[in-house]
Amino acid sequence: MAPKSSDGETNDGSSKETEAMEISTGSLLGKRKVESEEDSDSSWGKDSFDGREYHSSDDMEEYSSDEYERRNRFYRRTVIETKGFFESCCKFPRYLWYGIVKISDLEKEVHQGVSCRQFLANMACECLEKYNKKNNKGFNVKFDRILRANFNPSSTTKYYITFAARESDSPDAPLVEYQAKAARRAGKTYPILCRPSPPKTHDHLRGDGGDQLKEVAKVTEEIS
């Protein structure tokens, strides 16, 4: 099995995002990790990353070089601190044998007539629908568009979706960044959580893509 790049491609250059939407990568370590997370995420709104902290002393893996060790430790720290909703970063390892990676091509067709962007939007909307039902705030959060997404492919694939939403029925309401986490198994979506994105308190959590929400808001304003 070729390793995944941090942008969701294999070492031979071929993309595996479409296949990984539904099937296992065959990584036993990744599978065990996902299955343990599935157990702890069985209740709505419960995040398996809650309470987890990164400690370099916990990392007992042997690395082939100092550079790869630095990149891998940075990746692991970022995954834990963002709870899987990280932005792509040039400091990550180029290839990963298992773990959460970015979905790089949102326009790719994953099913007949369904793009990856729409596939992710459908899952995000399922999570958002449950969020609106559970949170009686006097208004419904309205989905606007997908910003980015990460996933951890396995027999049960986890998706970490960041999207823009409006906390009002008004089309002029400001865009707010939200997060949705869902599991996908045997063609069925299992919503795990939905919430406003927490503030990015550390520069290393901002990634290389800039502020997508501000860019979307600017384009929307120019169009209108």
Image (cartoon, rainbow, N blue to C red):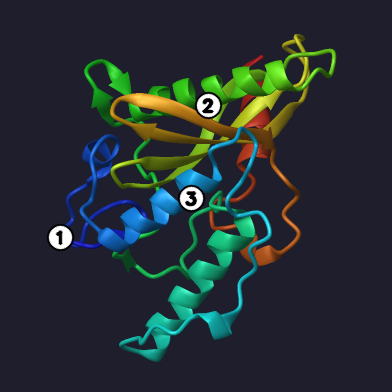
Q: Nearer the viewer, residue 127 or 102?
A: 127
Identify the disc placed on residue 37: 3
Of the pair 202 and 22, the residue shown nearer to us: 22
Q: Return the x and y of residue 158 as percentages of the image width and height.
A: 43, 42
Query: Considering the numbered disc 3 on the image, is that residue within a helix, a strand or a loop?
Result: helix
Neighbours of disc 2 within 10 Å: few (<14), some (14-19), many (20+) = many
User: SS class of the residue under badge 2?
Assistant: helix
Could you say which is closer to the camera, residue 220 or residue 75?
A: 75
Tag shown at residue 1: 1
Q: Earlier in the sequence, mark 2 or mark 1?
A: 1
Q: Quadrant of residue 157 in the image?
A: top left
Secondary structure found at label 1: loop
| 58 to 140, vertically: above or below | below
How many residues crowd around disc 3 within 10 Å: few (fewer than 14), some, or many (20 or more)? some
Q: CA distance from mark 1 to mark 3?
A: 23 Å
The picture places residue 130, in percent across and down from the top left corner, at 62, 20
- Identify which residue is drawn at 54% across, 60% down: 79
Check disc 1 and give the amino acid type: Met
Quadrant location of the N terminus in the rendered image: bottom left
Q: Position of residue 12 (x, y in %)?
A: 14, 59
